[in-house]
Each structure stands twice: as structure tokens, then as C-alpha cells.
Image (tube, coloured by chain):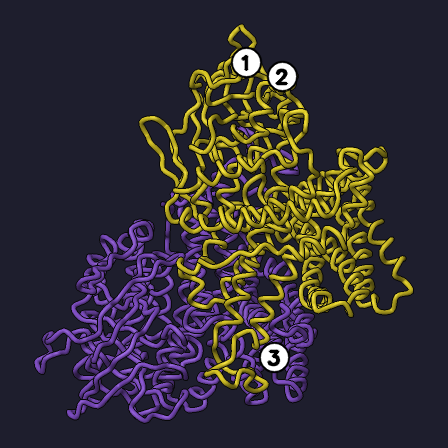
Chain colours: A purple, B yellow
Amino acid sequence: MGQYNAPLRDMQFVLHELLNVEAELKAMPAHESLDADTINSIAEEAAKFTQNVTFPLNQSGDEEGCHHDKATGDVKAPKGFKEAYAQYVEAGWPALACDPEFGGQGLPEVVNNVLYEMLNSANQAWTMYPGLTHGAYAALLAHGTPEQKAAYLPKIVSGHWTGTMCLTESHCGTDLGLLRTKAEPNGDGSYALSGQKIFISAGEHDLAENIIHLVLARLPDAPVGTKGISLFIVPKFIPNADGSIGARNGIKCGAIEHKMGIHGNATCVMNLDGATGWLVGEPNKGLNAMFVMMNGARLGVGMQSLGLAEVAYQNSLAYAKDRLQMRSLTGPKAKDKPADPIIVHPDVRRMLLTQKAHVEGARAFAYWSGLMLDKEHNHPDEKVRKDAADLMALLTPIVKGFITEYSYISTTMGMQVYGGHGYIKEWGMEQYVRDARINMIYEGTNGIQALDLLGRKVLSDMGAKLMKFGKLVTELVKAEAGNEAMKEFTGPLAELGTEVQKVTMEIGQKAMKNPDEVGAASVPYLHLVGHFVYAYFWARMAKIALEKQDQGEFYKTKLATARFYFAKLLPETAMNLKQIRAGADTLMALDAANF
Amino acid sequence: MGQYNAPLRDMQFVLHELLNVEAELKAMPAHESLDADTINSIAEEAAKFTQNVTFPLNQSGDEEGCHHDKATGDVKAPKGFKEAYAQYVEAGWPALACDPEFGGQGLPEVVNNVLYEMLNSANQAWTMYPGLTHGAYAALLAHGTPEQKAAYLPKIVSGHWTGTMCLTESHCGTDLGLLRTKAEPNGDGSYALSGQKIFISAGEHDLAENIIHLVLARLPDAPVGTKGISLFIVPKFIPNADGSIGARNGIKCGAIEHKMGIHGNATCVMNLDGATGWLVGEPNKGLNAMFVMMNGARLGVGMQSLGLAEVAYQNSLAYAKDRLQMRSLTGPKAKDKPADPIIVHPDVRRMLLTQKAHVEGARAFAYWSGLMLDKEHNHPDEKVRKDAADLMALLTPIVKGFITEYSYISTTMGMQVYGGHGYIKEWGMEQYVRDARINMIYEGTNGIQALDLLGRKVLSDMGAKLMKFGKLVTELVKAEAGNEAMKEFTGPLAELGTEVQKVTMEIGQKAMKNPDEVGAASVPYLHLVGHFVYAYFWARMAKIALEKQDQGEFYKTKLATARFYFAKLLPETAMNLKQIRAGADTLMALDAANF
């Protein structure tokens, strides 16, 4: 069944040496009393929980899957999931990053990311039950009435109730403007919702006392398209005035999907048959409220893929050290053994280092993003808040679209290191590939992320947000201008920055004549900017490693991994640039009938 | 469950317009009477069989999997597999490309490839039962005694008996020198074999009367390593002198593996407990005989991936034309509908065209490879035979390593076109991804293919075989030198040829100082040369399409696809070249303990 050991040392490196979180958080009143030791203790406890409680359920959950009772609509999660969730609630984990006003511990997002990396490494399918709850929490916190908050948030924060996002219908996923679920006023302030939602992760299960669905639907006479969508809160059981569980509501699971992976999470068809719901936020403004959930969910998907890539790397590394096969091309290394461990072979190292460089690049970027969210929400300086918000608007599609794409490649490589054994379920590697595959699809496919990045985040403000990130890069390059040892990193980084700027302008100009140029460039553009972001973080990590390389192998390894990234992975940008510059013509030349 | 329609028009284009097979085959006495109409009729019959008989069993076979009886060791394939195989045998398909001396139809390999593309599109797991038999056939034909051939080949050719290759043991896959299975002489010319083999595809099943295992084992006092391996024929039932089925032999299935995909094929642990076997070929020369099987198997794996990429493309194309979601960036296209079909979106087209260009490039290359095999085996001119043999030695790792790598990417893209529906089993797309994944691993991982290409096929003869392929390219470029319309293809092709030659020499020089440079360069080198091969075939296809573009949309589409390939896929070589030139240093810098 493989192994998982939380990479605490590397997490600490990112938190304390790269991001200096204690000092950064101290600047925010909400987090001013949090110190590094506390953060490290939380991480250690999270490591114990994930290693001992949820990781042992990962493979068994995949094999068993979820169980749906057609008669009642009830769903049972795999054996052990419910008990693990009870432990999770008991320990207070759901409340970690929630508002103290509703029982939360008020810890920063960056610490929550550390927890979620581990949860996802240990068991993505299980983690989706509490994970999706956070979206419902955020939407209610931002848009709920005081009464709604009082009625729902304490139970959600404690984890006794979980939440879902009910958006997709069978004929519309990306294009929510087409949705048909209806909400009719009941006359008492509530609404009767009818329709069918599909692909509802954790839509029904036996882990929590109640499930709070946030449902997109149309009011009578709502405008067509996205401007006629409203958000409703539809609890599985309608809470009584005293907070206890009341009547069963008319929202039931009609079926669960059979999927490629994440078998342990119930992906539900949810039928609403006059279900009672209450409006959240303003009528017809549901999409705004939904985006609060969606942005959080997109960052969460990036964390899922970071977690999977980490655990896949750990296992393939262990296998590569253990498996004896062939001799090194430069002569036997393990002379006392019948063959050398396969980690001696350059191409096995290429696969391991690709995983390692992507995992550690993703971790640096994802934790930094958590810190940006904290600044956006909690920093006293308005300009800092604005800059952080702009950076997160720009980079959310990269967290989602780039981390998931390369983590999929990473888990696939981890499996390849195992040779034939990688294809056998028993070894556990193929599950990581199957689980990682969904992350490229849900919460907006990676193609949608790329359009969001290039169309909405870059071109729509003439590159202003992109320039804010570019400024961080320029500052680093300038600061290190006199540092000869850093040239191997800052040189290519600065060059890439120039190319990104140039090619962005080229696309902008072409797009004015032909909007299809945006769609044509979008995915290679996301990969290009993704590498720009990783190259920035790898340069920053290299700087620390260069300074501390006499303090131990950890820093030498970090430096070697940075060099590998620049030598072997960054060259993908040469391809991206050519693909972008090739434009839309060859894509649009054919009539659909002639494909 | 999706659809499969054999792409007969495109197959005919490759066979008759690109490769001119009728004329080429007429130059070989064995095939001089074969005409284009006969080939087309065979293809049409194969289309009916695969569409109507094996394709409908693909998804059900995946869901059901195989059944192993622990008490008897018997294995049952999924429902319908046995009956489909009986139809296949009844129709004479197993004999298609076999030697008429043993009941074969003596048709060329290139025609067999057409059959196998369809079989694999329809059902890879099912196809592996007859597919692996071909390896046993080829090994016995090349190395069997006249008595062995008489006893086994007619039944194998007719398909009444199937065959396997028993190579791998739990501690050795790539490194067969480590294998432990023993063969002790019985004193009557036979041997008693004992040991355990794993990952034996189609190792045990209920489709055929008998299963003929070709088993690698060690004779007593055999030299250590690969020089002490012999090949044995070990039938499941020992044939009587009259050809009827005799006693059950001591080779039994101990377990079947639970795998990521190809669930319909039984992957067996085979226990040999004093099983009776007979030596094939000379003692201790088993690896030579095995390579006859292995080369055939590697080409066969390329055909598996071609088949999967084709069917995945067909389905994602149908979905992209049907699924309505969002409006085109250039304004509504299907004004009468609530949204446009997603094929209007440039990025969906990017995914479709990537699949299309890879499938059609692979088909041209794979069918051409079949024709090369025919020339190698049957051409009257010794120089033609030698050139064909050299080209196939060079290009076999590219058929295996490049087609499988990019077909996996293609099937993954096909799944992505479906959005969330691609992840659901019911739609059938995720099975193609799971099935395609094994092709990058078995019959020598793609990393091993890359080492074989660069180390054994290119550097060991100082690039002589590579120059034979380079000559084909140069001839094309020269022939089209005056053709202005072809410049957009021949220009980049010639440039790439120069770069391939240059970088090959650079690697050769570095490798003299450090053999690890070969392993470090190998995988990006395989991708580089793979693109060189595809670019050659796309240029040839473009030439025909340019000449005939007034004769219908088929040729315009071919031309547009060629342009897409050169604009959007060939740029990967810019990355490959940088990765190769970055050398081994960053791969080898770390001690294994510091990863």
C-alpha cells in the first residue's frame, strides 16, 4: 500500500525560510500572536492525523467505493471514512482557518494549506468531504444574512455539518447561463427548488449529521443567461429554531457516478423535488456569490494535486532506491548486489527530479498563495490588500491549471518508475494517476483556467495585474544583480520575463483583430506563465540554498533541484512561445464537418 | 458506450496514395498477386468484425474483468470473449499474415497492421489474446525444429491454440539476466521447468483449446547473466503424436493481477512446477530467440496505441460536435441553439487536432513500418532487404516509444474534451486512458526504448542506420526543392534533419567521456527523432494533399492537419534539443540518499 511521510522539513523551509511567515503574519492584527513554533506544532499534529488515520483508508476506499441505496437515496462512504471524520471533527481540524466569531480558530490560510497538502497526500477522496464544506462556509460568510450565519456557520465550522456546491446540470457545466433548476417563492420567505444537479461531490454521505447544499437556480421571470441565476441554501435536514436537526428536505441523491478515480468520494446526482431553500445574497446575483466558492475551490484543487504529486514522488523514490535492475552505464555501483538500484540510471533520475522539482515548486507557489490570501483578507494596509487581491486574481488559474497539469505528469512519471508494478493496483501508484486526472477537469477545466488567465485576468486590464507579478520578478533580479552565483537563475528568469511581456502584447494586438487568437494562445500561455512563476520561486529558493549550502545536504539538494528545473523543465517555454506565436490560423482553418 | 467506425478512407489513403502498396508488394514474389481491391476487401471485412463483434465487448469486458479459480488455476475471460474468439478463428483471421506452409494466408505485414489497428481500436484487451500468439508463432518459425514447427504451428496459425511469452519474474523485468526459472534435463530430450513468471498477458484463459508458452529459463550450469538463458516451449496440454490434446502440464496460473486497465485480458502469475518443456533454438541463446518475439511485440504495442488514439479521437470529435456550451469568441455560430457546439472553441480544436495529427502521423509511420518488414522478409533484392532491416532496427523503438507516448497524451486530451463526462466510466473515454497507459510500460518501458534507440541503434554504428533514414528525408527535400508550395514543410523538415545530425554527434562526443550522457539524453532524443519521423511522413502526406486539393475536402483536411502538425506540435523539438544539450550534470549531481 505504499507510504506517506509528511515532508515537514520541506514545509518548514517554505514557511519560514522562503516566506518568513511569522514576520509576515505578525503584520496582520488577526494573526499577530501566531509564532513559528505553533505553526510547526500544528503541522506535526496534522502529519500524525493524516499518516495514521486517513492514509490507511486511501487504497481501501478506492477499492470499495461508495454505496447508494436507491430506495432511500442514502449514501455510505467506504469503511472507516465516517470514523476518521469523527476523529477529525473531535480534534477541531475543520475550524482551523475559520472565523472565531463562529467557533473557528482563526488561523491563516497559509497554515490551512499545510494541512490540506497533507490531507490530500494521504487521501484525496476523503479530504473532499471536509474540503468542499469550506466553499459553503466562505459563501455564507461573505453573503449570508446574520440569521443564516448564526443558524449554519457554527455547525459548519465545527464540522458537524458539511457543505456542497450544486452548480452543474447535465446540459451545462462551464456554461452556467444555461441552467434550468427553478426556485418558486413559498410566500414565507423560503423557496421551493426543483431540478436536477449532477457531479455533486460529497453530495450525500454518512459522515455528518447534516449537509448544507448551496444551489444555483432561477427565480420565476429571472433574466436568461448568467444574469438570472440566484444562490440558495438548501439543507438536507431543515434546522429547527434551537439548532437541532428537523425535517428531511426534498433534496435526494438519485444516483452516484462510477468514475475513473476518487472512488471514495460520492459524486452524486441530486434531485430537488420542491426542496425548501433560502436565498443567499441578492436575487439574480448568484454567480457573484458562487465565485467566492469557486475561487476557493480552484485553489483547493491545486492543493489536491500538490498532495498527490508529493505522495507519488515519495513512493517512486523509495522504489527507485530499492529496486535492483541493470548496472549503471558508468560501471557497477552496488557491487555486493546482483544489480544496481535503478536510481543510478540517468533517465530514472530524470523522472524523479521532474517530480521533485514540480512538487517543491508547487509547494512554494501554493503556500505563498495562501499567504497572499491572508494579506488580501487581513492586512491593515489597503495597498497591500489590493496588491494581494490582484495577484491572487491573476494567479488563481495558474494554481489550478498549472499545478494540476504538471502534477498529473508527475504522478504518471512516478508510476513509470515502477515499470510493470506501477500498473498493478496493489502497489498504489495507478490510483494516484486516476485520482489526479480529475483535478485537470473539475472546478473549471484547465482550458477554462487558461481563458480566465489570458482573457479575463491579463488582457482585460492591459496586463496591469501581470505587471504586478513582473515587478516581484524584477525586484529579485535587481537585488541579485551583483550576485555572480545567482546569474544562472536570474539570467534565464529575466529573459523569460521579457518574452512573457513581449508575447502578451503580441497576443493582445492579434486579439483585437480576431478574438479567436485568445483561445488559440490560452493553454500554451498558461504553461508559459506557470513556468515564469515556478522559475521565480525556484530562483528565490536557490538564493537561500546558495547562502546556506554549507549548513547541510538539505540546501545542496535544494540547489541541485533548482539547477535541474532551469536546465530540464524551463526549456518547455521555448515550445510554449512557438505554439503561441503560431496563432489561430491552423486551428480555425477546418470546417467542423471536415475534422 | 461510444462508437467505433473503422477509418477506411484514411487507411486507403495511407496504403494506396502514400505507400503505393500494390506496386511495392508486386516486387515481392510472395505477394505479387495481391492487388489493392483485395486489400480493401479484407479491410472492409475486418471493419465489420471489429465494429460488430469485439467493440461491443470492450466496455463490458473492462467492467467484468477476468475470473480466476484458485483451486484449479483456470481463468475465464469476460462474457462474450470466448464466442468472439471462436468467430475470429472461424473466419480465418489468425492465419492472415502467417506462412502458407503451416496453413497461413501469407498476406503481408502491412495488411496485418490494418487488421490490428482496427482490433485495437475496438478492444485492446481482447486483441491481446490473438496478438501475443503472433510472438510465439514468430519465435517457433524462426528457431523451432521441423518437428516442433509441424507439431505446433498449424494449430497456432489456425488460432485453435494461442501463445504467450513468459519472460518476467518478480525481481526482473528489464534485467532478464537475473532470471531464476530452472530447466533440468529429463533425459528424454525434454526438460523439467520450475519457477515463477509474472505479468504473463493471456497466460491462462478459456478462449483456446491449448496455450503454448514460450518460457525463458536457465539450464543447469548455465553461465550467469543473459548468456545463460535458454528458450523453451511449454504447452499447457502436451500434444499427443496425432496432434490431439494430451496430458495437462505443470504450468498453472497462480493468480491474476488487478490492474489499472486492460481488465479483459488476464495478466497471470504462472507457476511452473516441473513443467515439461522442450528447448527452442540453441542452449543459452534464448535471448536471441526471445528478441524475435520482442521486436514483433514492440511493433504490436505501437499498433495498440494507434488503435486507442483513433477510437478516442473519434469519440471526442463526436462529442465536440454535439455538446453545446458557451458562444464562440467571434460571435454565435449556432444561432438557433442555446449555445454553440464546443468545436467552435479554438482550444477544443487544439485538442482535437493534436489527436488527429498524432493518429494520422502514427498510421502513416506504422503502416510504412509494416511494409518495411515485408521488404525485410520478402524482397528479392538483398540490398533492399538489408536497408529495410536496418530501418526497422532503428525505428522499432520509435514505433513503440513515440506512438505510445503521444497516443497516451491523445487519449488524455480526448477525455479532456468531454469535461466532467470524460471522468465517468459510462462514457467510455477514461477506459481508453487506462488501457493506453500500459503501452508505455510493457515490452520494455519507453525509457528502455529510448536507450535502445540512442545507445544500441544510433551510437553503436556511428549513426549509419540513422543516416539511412536521413537519406529518405534528404531525397524528399531535394525532390521538392523546386516546389514552392512544399517549402513550408520541407524547410522545417530539412532544418530539423540538420539539428538531429548535429545533436547526435554532440551526444556521441560527450558519451565517450561519460556514458551517463547517453541515458541523460535518451528520452528527449527519442521524442526528437520521433518528431523527425512524423514530420517526414506529414511532409509526404502534405505533398499528396497539395496535388489533389481540388479533388475534395479529404485532401484539404489532410493539408490543414499537416499545417497544424508543423505549426503546433513540431515546436516540441525546440524543447527536446534544449533538454538534450543540458546534458547529464543536473541529473547526476545528487547522491541517491539526498533525493
Question: Helix or strand or loop: what does disc 3 sit on?
Answer: helix
* Mark closest to the chain's N terminus, 2 or 1: 1
Q: Which label belongs to residue A474?
A: 3
Q: Chain of mark 3?
A: A
Of circles 2 and 1, the one toward us is 2
Q: Which residue is mark 1?
A: B220
Can you name the residue that lies furthest to the left here? A242
The amino acid type of the residue labelled 2 equals: Pro
Q: Chain of mark 1?
A: B
The correct choice, above or below, for A326 with respect to B188 in the image is: below
Residue A477 is situated, as x and y percent measured from the top left of the image, at: 62, 75
Residue B336 is situated, as x and y percent measured from the top left of the image, at: 50, 85
Of circles 3 and 2, the one toward us is 2
Q: Nearer the viewer, residue B591 or A591?
A: A591
Apparent side of residue B110 relative to residue A159 in the rendered image (left or right): right
The amino acid type of the residue labelled 1 equals: Pro
| Real-space CA distance between mark 2 and mark 1, rounded to the nearest whole angstrom | 11 Å
Query: Dot 1, how many residues are within 10 Å of its Cα: few (below 14), some (14-19), or many (20+)?
Result: few
Of circles 1 and 3, the one toward us is 1
Q: Chain of mark 2?
A: B
Q: Which label belongs to residue B283?
A: 2
Q: Look at the numbered discs 2 and 1 and tell me whether their residues touch, using CB distance below 8 Å.
A: no
Q: Quadrant of the C terminus of chain A?
A: bottom right
Residue B111 is situated, as x and y percent measured from the top left of the image, at: 67, 43
Is residue B591 among the parts visible in the rendering?
Answer: no
Query: Dot 3, how many residues are within 10 Å of its Cα: few (below 14), some (14-19), or many (20+)?
Result: some
Q: Nearer the viewer, residue A6 or A121?
A: A121
Q: Quadrant of the N terminus of chain A?
A: top left
Residue B288 is situated, as x and y percent measured from the top left of the image, at: 66, 27
Is residue A66 among the parts visible in the rendering?
Answer: yes
The correct choice, above or below, for B99 with respect to A321 in the image is: above
